[in-house]
Image: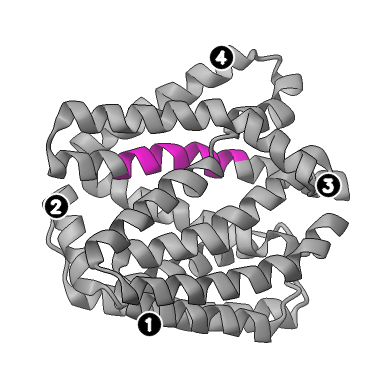
């Protein structure tokens, strides 16, 4: 926990400066280049932060379940295929679950070490806060969201739904934040949280849909998540443990990226590739959320 506290301010400052720099870059370059950079960010650090799930499962479950690393890896691959099939046959359900799982994971990552309770209300708050991040992104990129959802699912959603989602998420997040803070369930620095949301408003209202998502996903989620995973696995966040994490993650990351580009080569169809890209992200997100949920629970039990 001391390692988490020690690096929190440094990461917070780094994320703020990097967000403004990334925003400045995004308004200076052509949209096509902006999108390309965003995809590179997601496929590098973004995917990397979820590439060590097999090792995380080994760390938390292997000794309890007496299951081999191969069986863990096989289960992971089967889940990838299951999510891909779900995207193919019921894309609207798969996309909805992807957003919900991602929203919960964003909130959990951001607030876990600030929480003093494992109550269901805290878990609900994780989901609502993550939905606030998504709804802000969607609110400022409504037409792009509508186009992407239609391209993947053939469902045409209305602007009103995105507007309602935004105001609902804002209102509920404000109420729960002050309630949980008042009950001392969450240890919050309200000024820091407000600054983060203001930065996200600036980013989402000026960057494209994919660039805005990449800036939040990389700077405010993936990098802090990498830090937390390293601390849980290796007790301390330092250069040696970072290199060890990268070494253990590299093979799984390489397999993931190679598979995605292989699909792109064989599909040769932009629409199919966009669907496959999101199913690829979802296939990593679903097991990663479960792994991190279990990891945080184990960490909470040890701390108690």
Label whose residue precedes the other's in the sequence (2 or 1): 2
Q: Please tell me whether the stretch drawn in magenta is mainly helix, strand or loop.
A: helix
Q: Nearer the viewer, mark 3 or mark 2?
A: 3
x and y percent of residue 8 in the render? Answer: 74, 66
Q: Rounded to the nearest whole Å, what is the CA distance between mark 3 and mark 2? A: 44 Å
Q: Position of residue 11 (x, y in %)?
A: 68, 65
| Mark 1 lies on residue | 167
- Real-space Cα distance between discs 3 and 4? 29 Å
Q: Look at the numbered discs 2 and 1 and tell me whether their residues touch, using CB distance below 8 Å.
A: no
Instruction: Determine which residue is flagged by label 3.
Output: 236
Instruction: State yes or no: discs 1 and 4 in contact (Cβ < 8 Å).
Output: no
The residue wearing badge 2 is: 151
Q: Is residue 148 above or below residue 277?
A: below
Q: Residues within 10 Å of mark 1 (few under 14, many from 20)?
A: some
Boundaries of the magenta span: 278-291
How would you rate the neighbour count of disc 2 (Cα within 10 Å): few for under 14, some for 14-19, many for 20 or more?
some
Mark 3 or mark 4: which comes first in sequence?
4
Q: How many residues crowd mark 3 within 10 Å: few (<14), some (14–19), many (20+)?
A: some
Task: Tell me if residue 222 can be seen.
Answer: yes
Q: Are marks 2 and 4 in contact (CB under 8 Å)?
A: no
Determine whether the residue tagged by mark 2 lies in a helix, strand or loop. Answer: helix
Circle 4 sits on which residue?
71
> Is 46 or 282 nearer to us in this picture?
46
Residue 41 in the image: state x and y as whole percent. Answer: 44, 52
Note whether residue 1 is visible. no
Q: Are marks 3 and 1 in contact (CB under 8 Å)?
A: no
Q: Secondary structure at mark 4?
A: helix
Residue at image point 60% right, 38% down: 291
């Amino acid at each position: 926990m001391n390692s988490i506290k020690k690096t929190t301010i440094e990461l917070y400052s780094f994320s703020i400066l990097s967000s403004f720099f990334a925003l400045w870059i995004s308004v200076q370059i052509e949209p096509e280049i902006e999108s390309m950079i965003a995809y590179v960010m997601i496929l590098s650090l973004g995917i990397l932060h979820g590439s060590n799930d097999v090792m995380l499962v080994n760390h938390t479950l292997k000794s309890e379940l007496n299951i081999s690393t191969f069986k863990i890896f096989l289960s992971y691959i089967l889940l990838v295929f299951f999510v891909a099939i779900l995207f193919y046959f019921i894309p609207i359900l798969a996309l909805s679950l992807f957003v919900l799982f991602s929203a919960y994971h964003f909130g959990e990552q951001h607030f876990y070490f600030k929480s003093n309770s494992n109550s269901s209300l805290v878990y609900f708050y994780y989901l609502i806060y993550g939905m606030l991040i998504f709804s802000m992104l969607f609110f400022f990129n409504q037409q792009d969201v509508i186009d992407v959802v239609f391209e993947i699912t053939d469902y045409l959603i209305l602007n009103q739904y995105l507007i309602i989602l935004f105001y609902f998420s804002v209102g509920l997040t404000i109420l729960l934040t002050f309630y949980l803070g008042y009950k001392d369930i969450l240890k919050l620095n309200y000024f820091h949280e407000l600054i983060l949301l203001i930065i996200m408003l600036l980013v989402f209202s000026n960057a494209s849909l994919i660039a805005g998502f990449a800036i939040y996903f990389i700077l405010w989620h993936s990098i802090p998540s990498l830090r937390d995973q390293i601390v849980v696995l290796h007790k301390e966040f330092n250069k040696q443990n970072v290199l060890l994490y990268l070494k253990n993650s590299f093979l799984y990351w390489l397999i993931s990226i190679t598979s995605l580009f292989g699909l792109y080569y064989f599909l040769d169809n932009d629409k199919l590739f966009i669907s496959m890209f999101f199913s690829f992200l979802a296939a990593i997100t679903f097991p990663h959320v479960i792994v991190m949920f279990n990891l945080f629970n184990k960490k909470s039990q040890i701390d108690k």
